[in-house]
Image: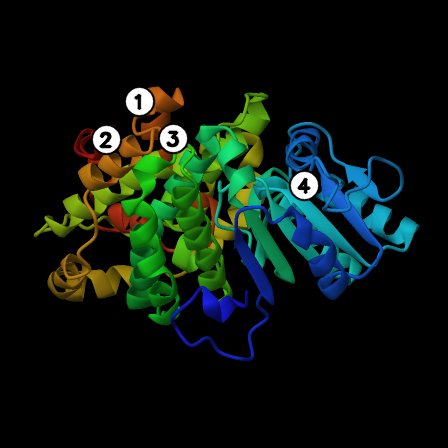
Amino acid sequence: MKLLDLCSETLPGSLDLSEEILIGAKLCGEIPRLAAEHVGRRPLWLADPRTWDALGRADTLRVSGRPENGPGLHLLPDEPHANTEQIGLTCAAVEAGGFSGIIAVGAGTVNDIAKMAATLSGVPYMAFGTAASMNGYASGIAAVLVDGLKTTIAARPPRAIILDSEILCQAPPALAAAGLGDLLSKPISTADWWLGNRLEGSGFEALPGRIVDEAVAHATEHAAGLPAGDGAAHEALARALVLSGVSMVVAGSSSPASGGEHLLSHLWDMEALVCGRELRLHGAQVGVATCLCAALYQLLVELENPEFPKIPNWPRTSERIRIAHGELAEAILPQAEKKFSGFGARSALLRAEWPQIRAELAGLALPSAAEVRTILQAAGAPASLDALGIERDEVFDALARARDIRDRYTVLDLAFELGFFPGGIRQVILTAGV
């Protein structure tokens, strides 16, 4: 099916969007046709051991044409990271074999690697998703670790996407729960996007939100069916996640789907890698972080008389970042400095127009933390810090520092620029109920 069959909105014809998207049951047999049409007759298959096994279990008749081994398969290490090393090795495999394109078999990390490798190698790729765990399948960006910093980099979306509900249902339930957590962040990230435009004139448009609104509502209505492996629930989630990725292409950035809640998750990921700690599922973290950011918006909308802080200077701010972020600081500082340069202008606007901005934020009618928690709980997704294994002090620390890691204005910045943080951080955690 074409993208327009998934989306009721009229999409700009000039955009680089996926050409064909299949969501449904028993779709392995479509891989040879889509591969021939979209990535050529000599593709390189890219997977990790778990995702390759997932396709193999479903593909008992070898209808997908998957190779058993040999030069047509580039197998990533178990639990790979989307970093420059793995992207470089994949590019080298494409070049050495003269492959016409890439077929990515997997979810977030595998597709980030494939997306970047295909873009850098100048070949097309298609995605065969093994879990409805994230919203990046159809997006025009890849999340890549560069010098320890989680960075989003522009890349071409896949030419075709297959999401077979039978395979999605066989994935560990925690993966679909993570996809739902990623999806539930949309109202908060869209509010952050609106807020950045309101205070910085950075740009905002309503179409990306309209593209995905109905699909998100449909997916949340069916969320309770995810733990039981209900095919319709997984297909609804998959459709919403694909359209969330499309919304990013339309926006030209990840802003419609990635705000302060994603910064919290990215910071936890970055620090886990530095400490050698096992990574949690990104979407699971995002779901709980969405509760925190929803609570923060609620508290700021109630803030009638902010105690605006003095405008800090950059030398002191940069020293704070060096102390707070340790070995990650050098990668973070350029992002933080770009955002810091607008502090004075934003502060002046907030002082002059906070009552009006506050009313406009209230008009966005954002979900409460309790509403987000209820949906997460219905789907068996982590809805508390304990469920994620995160200590209260770790969350306090993340709420204080996550704003530093990216040049993107979010509610985390607003809390500091209104003087609500750091003093109000504990109140946010309590209000979030996590």
Left or right position of 344 against 7: left
- Measured in 3D between alpha carbons, the distance from the residue under mark 3 to the one under mark 2, in whole angstroms, is 27 Å
Query: Could you tell me the amino acid type at mark 4?
Result: Asn
User: Mark 1 and mark 2 in contact (Cβ < 8 Å)?
Assistant: yes
Lower sequence index among marks 1 and 3: 3
Lower sequence index among marks 4 and 3: 4
Q: Which residue is mark 3?
A: 227
Up-down: is 225 above or below 406?
above
Lower sequence index among marks 2 and 4: 4
Q: Which residue is mark 4?
A: 83
Numbered badge on residue 392: 1
Q: What x and y, as percent, mark residue 425?
A: 24, 34
Lower sequence index among marks 3 and 2: 3
Mark 2 Cα within 10 Å, few/some/many (few <14, many 20+)? Answer: many
Front residue of 37 and 184: 37
Identify the residue at image location x=77%, y=46%. Answer: 65
Q: Secondary structure at mark 2?
A: helix
Numbered badge on residue 429: 2
Query: Could you tell me the amino acid type at mark 2?
Result: Ile
Identify the residue at image location x=29%, y=57%. Answer: 191
Up-down: is 111 above or below 249?
above
Front residue of 329 and 381: 381
